[in-house]
Amino acid sequence: MRTSCLTAQHYCFRRPRTWISSGGLETMGYGLPAAMGAHFARPDEPVCVVAGDGSLQMNIREFGTIAQYDIPVRILVLNNRYLGMVRQWQELFYDRRYAFTDLPMDFVGIARAYGIEGETVEAGGDVRSALSNALEHAGPYLVDFRIEREENVFPMVPPGAAINAMIDPGAG
């Protein structure tokens, strides 16, 4: 899932220098270490990372660093239990011939094993309450948002195509 693009499109930023991104390069695993660095750059500001489940697994070992140094990062996982873009490409361009992309992961259980508190929010669950819990918690906190498994992310450029061949079902 392209969470940096999704966040940029839907989150209302109120002040400059409050959002860090890999610049649209969609680098999996960028968010968690970037959030850790953001905390040290601005220790008096709350820091949240919005990451897809596949991206978070790229640096999940950093839970140990977060716990050891009590870095109060709020980890918001958009968990569709897939490598979302891989699954989307397989659906749209390869006649649903799926290679292994199913990732059933207990992120809250893993976080708790490191001493990080957290909770799971099922699709349609109480998002506001979970976000409040995360922001009010004094230390690191993880919220595992279980989102629609096969929701596609657009716009996107098909493999081998030019930018003017972009697919955007929601456009005009």
Image (cartoon, rainbow, N blue to C red):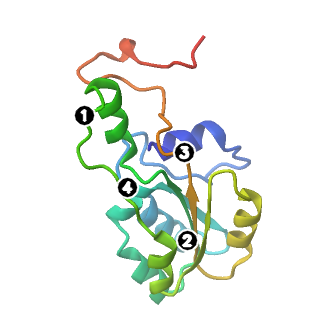
* Residue 148, disc: 3
Q: Residue at x 48, y 49 (%)?
A: 21
| Residue 99 x %, y % | 23, 44
Answer with the quarter of the image where residue 165 lies: top left
Residue in the image at 25% along x and 49% along y: 100
User: In terms of sequence position, does the residue under pointer 4 or pointer 1 come before the other?
Assistant: 4
Q: Amino acid at mark 4?
A: Gly
Q: In the picture provided, is 156 more to the left or to the right than 13?
A: left
Q: Which residue is mark 4?
A: 54
Say which residue label 1 marks: 97
Picture layout, residue 56 above or below residue 85: below
Label whose residue precedes the other's in the sequence (4 or 2):
2
Query: Crowdedness of circle 2 by 10 Å Cα count: few (<14), some, many (20+)?
Result: some
Nearest to the eye among marks 1 and 2: give it: 1
Mark 1 vs mark 3, CA separation in Å? 20 Å
> Can you say which quadrant of the picture contains the N terminus?
top left
Give SS at disc 1.
loop
Amino acid carrying label 3: it is Glu
User: Residue 89: horizontal and vertical position, in percent?
Assistant: 32, 32
Contact check, label 1 and label 3, Cβ < 8 Å: no
What amino acid is labelled 1 in the image? Arg
Q: Nearer the N terminus, badge 3 or badge 2?
A: 2
Q: Where is mark 2, residue-wise?
A: 39
Q: Residues within 10 Å of mark 4 (few under 14, many from 20)?
A: many
* Residues at discs 1 and 2 in contact (Cβ within 8 Å): no
In the rendered image, residue 122, in percent from the top left (x then y), is placed at 62, 58
In the image, taking residue 62 as reference, residue 45 lies left or right, namely: right
